[in-house]
Amino acid sequence: MQTDTGQSPADQIIGAFGGIRAMQRALREKHPNLVKNWSTSGRIPHYREDQIRRAAAEGRINLPEGAMLQLFPKLAA
């Protein structure tokens, strides 16, 4: 799924961190291809949402909320 920017929501989130390696460092992730695989597939597993939000808060990174909602839709109450 791509937005009108031509980037997938996953790529928008990765870009907010400053790129693949920067996001990998922010998440303290040791697997070198993890974030790259997210970029390639255009998807980020739902169970990573909290980790991404915490890392963004720690790094004072403004996440693109539209992209976050596309990847991690909130369940209706």
Image (spheres, helix red, strand yellow):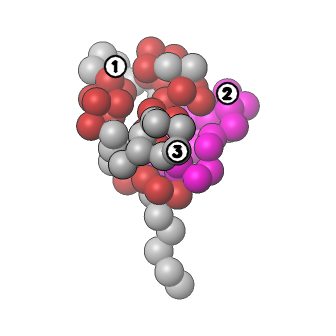
Kindly indicate whether the residue at mark 3 contacts the one at mark 1 (C-beta within 8 angstroms).
Answer: no
Q: Report crowding for label 1: few under 14, some 14 to 19, many 20 or more residues within 10 A (C-alpha).
A: few
Mark 3 or mark 2, whichever is nearer to me: 3
Which is nearer the N-term, disc 1 or disc 3? Answer: 3
Mark 1 or mark 3, whichever is nearer to me: 3
Q: Pointer 2: what residue?
A: 59
Q: Amino acid at mark 1?
A: Lys
Which is nearer the N-term, disc 3 or disc 2? Answer: 3
Whole-number angstrom distance, CA of label 1 to CA of label 3: 32 Å
Q: Amino acid at mark 2?
A: Gly
Q: Pointer 1: what residue?
A: 30
30 part of magenta stretch: no
What segment is highlighted magenta in the picture? 49-68
Q: Pointer 3: what residue?
A: 4
Q: Report the magenta stretch's main SS.
A: helix
Disc 3 is placed on an element classified as loop
Which is nearer the N-term, disc 2 or disc 1? Answer: 1
Residue drawn where x is 62% and y is 50% of the image: 65
